[in-house]
Every structure is written in C-alpha cells, then in structure tokens.
C-alpha cells in the first residue's frame, strides 16, 4: 500500500487541490513537503499530534518533511477558527516556544542526515521591505476573494483587523520561499488551513510558473464534531510537565466508544487491518481497544517505560492488577492535621485536587469527591490523620481524576 492509500485508509485526508496528481506523487515519487506550526504556546498539544503523525507516515514512505516554525507569522497570529485576535507575543517568547516545539517534535520525526528539515519563517519574513512585499506578493491577492473564505468570514461580524488580513499573504509567501529554497512541492495542514494553503499554491504558480499542491487532513474531533484534546484542566499537552503521562494515558483510555477506532487509525501506527479487528468489539469489550489506544499513544509521546507505568497505575485504580506506585501523588503538610484531623477541603486544596474551596464545595455537594471509595457528603467533612496508616489516602474526583495523597 502506498502512503497516499495509507493516509486515506486511516481517514486522515480531508481536501486536496489535485487528487490524481497528489496520489501519483506520494505513491511513486520522493518529494519535499511542509507543515507549519505557529508557536502560540511552550508545548505542542494533541491537535498538533495529527499533523506530526502525517509527517511521520510520509517520512516512513521516503518523503522529506519540513517542519516550518512561525517565527514570523507567530508575530501576527492566524485568525482561522478564532473569534478574537490572538494575543501578541514578544520575539523572545516566540523563540522560546519554537525551541520547545523542536525538542518535542524530534521524538517523532527523524531529523538526522537530512531526512527532515526544520525551518523558521522569521528568516525571510522579519526583514521584509513592506513596499517590496506588497508589490511582489500583495498584488496577486483579491481582498474580495479573501473575505469570502471561511477563515475570514467568521471574523467579519466581530471585527477583523488589517493586521490579521496579512496572515494569508505571509503563509502563502512561506510556500513560495520553501519552493525556491528546498524545491518543496506540497503544503499540508489541518483542514482549517485550506484557504491559506490555496493561497500558497496559487502564489507559487503565478510567481514561478510551477505546479505545486495542497492537502489538508481531518481535525481531531469526536463523532459529534467537537474538537478533542480538552479536559477540565485545559488542553492535553505533549509536555509531561504540563500533562503528566498518567493524565495523558487516562485521556485516551476514557474516550467515548464511538471515537476509539477512529483515534486508533489517526494516532497510532497499528496496521489498519489490526484496528479493523478491534472495530468488531462491542460494549465492555471495547475497553480492550481503549487500553491499546491509550498505551500506543502514550508510548509514542512519552516513551514505552512511561506508558507501562501509566498503564499499571490505571489498572491498579480500576481493579485489574497493576502497580499503584505510579498513580499521581501529592504530599500535604502533616501540620494541617491539628488534633488528628483536618477539613477535607483544606487537604484537597493543599494537594491541588481542587482549584478553590468554592469549587470543592460544589463538587462535594454533587457527590463528586470520594476518599478511599467513600463519597463525601458535606463540605464540613473531615479527614482523620489515622486514615493515612497505610501511608496514603486515595482521593477521586469525578470518574476520571485519581490522586494519591501522602503526608509530608
């Protein structure tokens, strides 16, 4: 199976500028392609993971990826899918974020010996002469057509700044520069980038007289069309300091039944025919597929030892064996326990199980917190110091958040 058919069989491809030509290029030639990443945070998140998996599939098939980091475009911010203008970041913040992205991406993409390239569009965007840029690039863009694109149409009602209107020109110029510098012939990105990708394809054709191509891949969404990768704590990050390997594992272990097979196809390298066998499972049997999904994805991002620890911790919590040593742990000061007891809310706040006492009260009143499998009934409930005789207590918030609390 060629890589085009591999991507298609996994449901990764959304739109293409020329399906016949792209299929031929991907299956029968070795090309250079690029995917852009704007450094809007100091860690990649699971939304980026789809793009990186596509890059990895392409690299395994012999194609050369360029990971383009937005040292220039990050100074503006992509308006696609945003209801308000993005926060403006300093050059120093952008550079720090790029360095974080590069380190994380190197776990999944092989950048040795020219097998993949890293580029920064700040190299050609930051020192542009604006008049020259308008004459070379701006002249090829119709504002009327740009405003018809979905990425801008959504914003017109709330207000779209001229500042942001430049973003499409700059991303299009990236493709032109990468074509000139590295003979790059394909831009890939999430489906929300379709308009920007078309802009680049057309600009290269007009400026260089060359045919280049664009492909978008499906966004990571649930079966109901909602974006995946969000928890009550916020985004699911690839940085273990921001989302621990256990939390990361648990996120995938708890996906809805309707989403598990699609996630396996998009986010693992398991063969499609093996995944199709898991698709035959129903009801409680689907938990086997969810365990496999969680393990495989955690292994890719955090390595096999971390994935094994996360799986053992999850099994110890949910009664199928495993090692409870790997459950997330917090220590609270023994001084909290005056007279041998402490208000449960104080303990949970010190352990960072709850963000505030008001949120803790709400959860307790709704029956959402348990200690050693006993639900708390009142915000006035207390925890005895003697409850720690085995060295810890196990607190549970909702169905998915478990925390081992020890005394320090």
Image: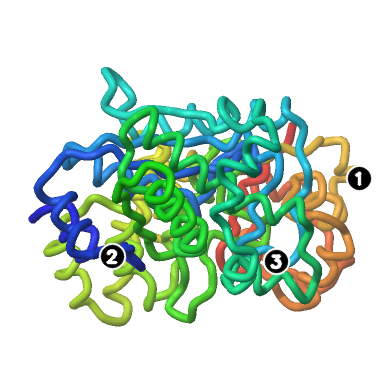
| Label 1 – label 3 distance at C-alpha | 24 Å
- Of discs 1 and 3, which sits in the foreground? 3
Q: Residue at x 20, y 54 (%)?
A: 270
Is residue 23 shown above or below 91?
below
Mark 1: which secondary structure?
A: helix
Q: Residue at x 74, y 69 (%)?
A: 376
- Which scheme is used to colour this image of the protein? rainbow
Q: Position of residue 116 (x, y in %)?
A: 32, 29
Residue toward you, 314 or 205: 205
Tell me the quarter of the picture where residue 197 sits.
bottom left
Counting residues from the start of the chain, the first of labels 1 and 2 encountered is 2
Counting residues from the start of the chain, the first of labels 1 and 3 encountered is 1
Q: Badge 1: few (under 14), some or many (20 or more) residues near its Cα, within 10 Å?
A: few
Residue toward you, 326 or 194: 194
Q: Badge 3: few (under 14), some or many (20 or more) residues near its Cα, within 10 Å?
A: many
Which label belongs to residue 369? 3
Which label belongs to residue 339? 1
Counting residues from the start of the chain, the first of labels 2 and 3 encountered is 2
> Disc 2 marks which residue?
289
- Of discs 1 and 2, which sits in the foreground? 2
Mark yes or no: residue 391 visible.
Answer: no
Q: Residue at x 55, y 33 (%)?
A: 121
- Of discs 2 and 3, which sits in the foreground? 2
**Along the horizontal axis of the image, is 213 left or right of 405?**
left
């Amino acid at each position: 199976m060629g890589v085009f058919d591999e991507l298609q069989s996994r449901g990764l491809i959304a739109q293409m500028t020329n399906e016949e030509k792209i299929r031929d290029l991907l299956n029968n030639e070795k090309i250079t392609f690029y995917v852009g990443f704007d450094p809007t945070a100091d860690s990649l998140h699971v939304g980026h993971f789809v793009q990186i998996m596509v890059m990895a599939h392409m690299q395994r098939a012999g194609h050369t990826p360029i990971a383009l980091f937005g040292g220039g475009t990050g100074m503006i911010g992509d308006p696609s899918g945003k209801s308000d203008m993005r926060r403006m970041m300093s050059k120093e913040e952008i550079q720090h974020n790029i360095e974080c992205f590069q380190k994380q991406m190197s776990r999944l993409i092989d950048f040795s010996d020219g097998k993949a390239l890293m580029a920064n569009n700040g190299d050609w965007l930051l020192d542009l002469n604006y008049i020259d840029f308008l004459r070379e690039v701006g002249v090829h863009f119709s504002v009327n057509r740009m405003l018809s694109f979905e990425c801008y149409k959504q914003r017109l009602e709330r207000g779209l700044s001229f500042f942001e209107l430049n973003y499409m020109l700059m991303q299009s110029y990236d493709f032109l520069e990468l074509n000139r510098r590295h003979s790059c012939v394909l831009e890939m990105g999430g489906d929300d980038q379709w308009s920007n990708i078309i802009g680049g394809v057309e600009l290269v054709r007009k400026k260089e007289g060359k045919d280049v191509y664009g492909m978008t891949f499906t966004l990571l969404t649930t079966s109901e069309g909602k974006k995946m990768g969000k928890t009550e704590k916020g985004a699911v990050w690839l940085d273990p300091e921001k989302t621990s390997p256990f939390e990361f594992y648990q996120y995938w272990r708890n996906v809805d039944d309707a989403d598990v097979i699609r996630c396996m196809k998009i986010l693992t390298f398991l063969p499609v025919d093996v995944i199709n066998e898991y698709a035959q499972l129903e009801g409680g049997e689907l938990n086997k597929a969810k365990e496999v999904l969680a393990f495989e994805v955690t292994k890719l991002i955090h390595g096999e030892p971390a994935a094994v620890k996360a799986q053992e911790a999850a099994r110890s919590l949910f009664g199928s064996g495993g090692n409870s040593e790997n459950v997330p742990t917090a220590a609270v000061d023994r001084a909290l326990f005056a007279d041998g007891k402490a208000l449960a809310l104080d303990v949970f706040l010190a352990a960072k199980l709850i963000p505030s006492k008001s949120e803790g009260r709400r959860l307790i009143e709704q029956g959402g917190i348990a200690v050693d499998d006993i639900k708390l009934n009142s915000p006035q409930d207390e925890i005895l110091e003697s409850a720690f005789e085995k060295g810890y207590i196990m607190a549970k918030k909702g169905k998915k958040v478990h925390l081992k609390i020890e005394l320090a």
